[in-house]
Amino acid sequence: MDLYKTSGLVETWLEELGDYQLEKQYRELNISTKENPADLVTQVDQNSEKWLVEKIHSHFPQHSIWGEEGGYIERDPDYLWVMDPLDGTMNYTHGLPIFGISLALQHKGETILGAIHFPRFAETFSAVKGNGAKCNGKKIRVSSEENPRKSLLGIAIPYSKIEGKIDDDYLAPFHSRFRGIRIFGCVVFDLCQVASGNLECSLSLKMNPWDVLAGILIIVEAGGSCFHRKTENNYSVLSANSSLLARLEKDIAFTRLLNF
């Protein structure tokens, strides 16, 4: 399997799918909810995943696929595509520009390829394991800043999973530790901003694999580091350059959230 050729193919898929999502954003979206009223899904989410599944199986018919909307399609256990066809659905339904499409390829449990596309910004981030990370074909690097007080922290928390379990006291300490905090409502956006050096660090709690696998590879290939805890299929991820991450890992404000 030629990963470089496949990466280019995936980028083309995501950009084409992004055009469809742009076309549909301000039309009737047929919005419904999942287990929580704040966890939205639209016909665009579902159609996007079906389209990606068809694209993958037209080129790699034996590969397994795990998607947010359609669940697990089991075929060859060695190759698994993990997808979020529309991350940031809440933003999308409200007409906001921060939403993205994320696709990762794993081989025997290791992520070897990742791509994330942001249709409204015409930006595609991608990485092949061992070959660096790029945005629209240009190499990217994480920030070299080591001081939290000169850093921006992105936070992604699915409140449907923590409601009633974590109160505002858990987040209050971060306001005095960092230059600023940003909550964009789209975890793949946070991760790509860390990879490109626009955010120095990000904290993502209780995420699903399709939320973070592509982004983690992109950060690592951009010279960054990710510390994560996994419980069942939930990932809690702290991302930064290695020096800053080493400082943050020792901070009790982070450890008690990562251990949640």
Image (cartoon, rainbow, N blue to C red):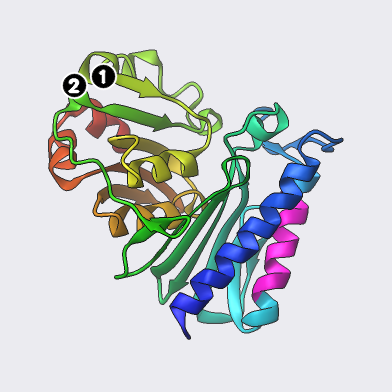
Q: Residue at x 50, y 78 (%)?
A: 5
Q: Quadrant of residue 250?
A: top left
Instruction: Specify the label residue 258 is tagged with.
Output: none
How many discs appear? 2
**Which quadrant, please, contains the C terminus?**
top left
Q: Residue at x 51, y 79 (%)?
A: 77
Mark-to-mark CA distance, 1 and 2:
5 Å
Q: Are marks 1 and 2 in contact (CB under 8 Å)?
A: yes
Q: Is residue 40 above or below residue 214?
A: above
**Amino acid type, mark 1:** Arg
**Amino acid type, mark 2:** Arg
Describe residue 105's horizontal placement relative to residue 237 as left or right: right
Per the rendered image, the range of residues in magenta is: 45-56
Q: Residue at x 61, y 33 (%)?
A: 97
Q: Tell whether position 8 is magenta.
A: no
Q: Main secondary structure of the magenta part?
A: helix
Please give the residue where the numbered disc 2 appears in the rendered image.
149
Please give the residue where the numbered disc 1 appears in the rendered image.
179
Instruction: Residue 18: give x, y in percent of width and height.
Output: 67, 51
Identify the secondary structure beneath mark 1: loop
Identify the secondary structure beneath mark 2: helix
Q: Is residue 260 visible?
A: no
First reached walking from the N terminus: tag 1 or tag 2? 2
Q: Is residue 203 visible?
A: yes
Depth check: give the residue in front, 254 or 182: 182
Q: Mark 2: give few (<14), some (14-19) or many (20+) Cα within 10 Å.
A: some
